[in-house]
Image (spheres, rainbow, N blue to C red):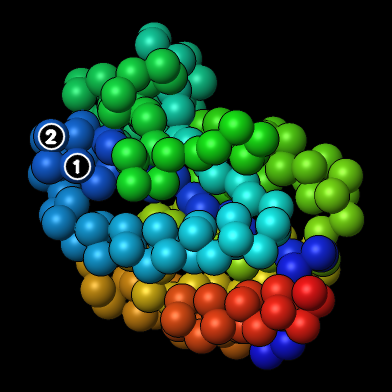
């Protein structure tokens, strides 16, 4: 798994208070947010390694307008509890990226109101501007925003590597099936420790 850090970016998806904190909106809806916490340490380790290697870094936030006029079918029909709990409203603590992964100045943050990190976010232009060919993906949830984003990246011929233990899901079976499905045609998967070792090795080779 040779890594070219110059043309590789780390993309961390939706690691936000609303999805992860027991005080967040998704916990109030009734989802088992404690399962999300398993992704925090691996994401933080990947982020530290990427920063140390000078890699390009981007994170996403799932956010809505205060009136949820941009929520679409997901809010209107599939999960109206999001509106009831004022979930992920732009500019609120609920929508913020968790403290452990707070972006630094110069690191890209893309807001979205649909599962894919690709759709109407500016990610495409950012990847092209930085001459990125390979994307390491981590974050939540495995079967929704991670999977949708990975499919969109892969179909545009980016080499995608999923940090499996740095992704999490509210249901373990959905997590397993999503990774298995993506691994067939859309991405390669690896543990964060192996990815970090690869990043460090590439950094040393380039020194």
Left or right of 153 in this view: 148: left
- Vertical arrangement, residue 73 with respect to residue 127, above or below: above
Which percent across, then down, holds residue 7?
81, 64
* Residue position marked by numbered label 2 in the rendering: 23
Q: Is residue 186 visible?
A: no
Quadrant assignment, res 202: bottom right
Front-most of 52 and 163? 52
Please tell me which residue is depicted at 73% across the width and 35% down the height of the picture.
122
Please tell me which residue is depicted at 27% across the width and 77% down the height of the picture.
173
- Vertical arrangement, residue 62 with respect to residue 184, above or below: above
What kind of element bears circle 2? loop
> Disc 2 vs disc 1: Cβ atoms closer than 8 Å?
yes
Quadrant assignment, res 139: bottom left
Which percent across, then down, holds residue 166?
40, 68
Q: Dot 1, crowdedness within 10 Å: few (<14), some or many (≥20)?
A: some
Front-most of 104 and 14? 104
Q: Outermost residue toward the top?
A: 67
Front-most of 39 and 152? 39
Which percent across, then down, holds residue 26?
21, 39
Q: Is residue 65 visible?
A: yes
Left or right of 134 in this view: 23: left
Q: Dot 2, crowdedness within 10 Å: few (<14), some or many (≥20)?
A: few
Q: Outermost residue toward the front?
A: 207
* Residue position marked by numbered label 1 in the rendering: 21
């Amino acid at each position: 798994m040779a890594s070219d850090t110059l043309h590789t970016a780390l993309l961390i998806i939706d690691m936000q208070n609303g999805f992860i904190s027991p005080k967040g909106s998704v916990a109030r809806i009734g989802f088992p947010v404690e399962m999300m916490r398993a992704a925090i340490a691996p994401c933080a380790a990947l982020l530290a390694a990427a920063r140390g290697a000078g890699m390009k870094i981007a994170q996403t936030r799932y956010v809505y307008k205060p009136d949820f006029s941009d929520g679409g079918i997901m809010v209107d029909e599939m999960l109206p509890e999001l509106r009831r709990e004022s979930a992920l409203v732009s500019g609120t603590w609920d929508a913020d990226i968790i403290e452990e992964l707070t972006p630094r100045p110069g690191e890209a943050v893309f807001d979205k109101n649909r599962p894919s990190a690709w759709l109407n976010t500016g990610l495409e232009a950012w990847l092209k501007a930085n001459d990125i060919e390979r994307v390491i993906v981590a974050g939540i949830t495995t079967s929704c925003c991670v999977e949708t984003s990975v499919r969109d990246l892969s179909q545009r011929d980016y080499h995608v590597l999923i940090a499996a233990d740095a992704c999490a899901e509210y249901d373990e079976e959905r997590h397993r099936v999503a990774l298995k499905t993506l691994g067939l045609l859309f991405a390669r998967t690896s543990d964060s420790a192996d990815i970090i070792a690869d990043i460090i090795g590439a950094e040393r080779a380039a020194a």
